[in-house]
Amino acid sequence: MGYLVCDKCRGYYKLEPDESPDDFEEECECGGKLEVVFDLSNVFEDIYCPQCGYKNPGITLFCRECGAYLKMEGKSLMMDSSK
């Protein structure tokens, strides 16, 4: 078993025992590329909010201190000012 993780929006899906990564498209609904991983802790390291500097768990999409929306672009973190 493993997870499909989007490199853009950080969305992920836990594969069921009877599912294979080949059963899915290679692209997320957001346009990012889906990658197969077996341990989410390797993907979602702690991240610092670019607005206030607060250290957030890597799986967080919103800063737990100031509420800023955190958006991934490739491997770098940035704030999405369109939200």
Image (cartoon, rainbow, N blue to C red):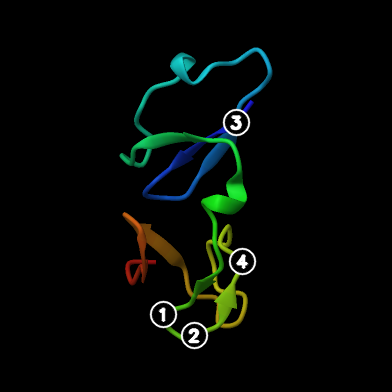
The residue sitting at the right extreme is 17
Give the mark nearest the N terminus, 1 or 3.
3
Q: Which residue is mark 1?
A: 50
Q: Up-down: is 42 above or below 17? A: below
SS at mark 3?
loop
Q: Which residue is mark 3?
A: 2
Amino acid, disc 4? Pro
Give the mark nearest the N terminus, 2 or 3.
3
Give the side of residue 64 with respect to residue 4, left or right.
right
Q: Which residue is mark 4?
A: 57
The answer to the question of whether label 1 and label 3 lie on touching residues, with beta carbons closer than 8 A, is no
SS at mark 4?
loop
Identify which residue, 41 or 19, lies in the foreground: 41
The answer to the question of whether label 2 and label 1 lie on touching residues, with beta carbons closer than 8 A, is yes
Q: Which residue is mark 2?
A: 53
Percent across and percent down for residue 57 are 61, 66
Identify which residue, 66 or 2, lies in the foreground: 2
The quarter of the picture where the N terminus appears is top right
Give the Cα distance between marks 4 and 2. Answer: 13 Å
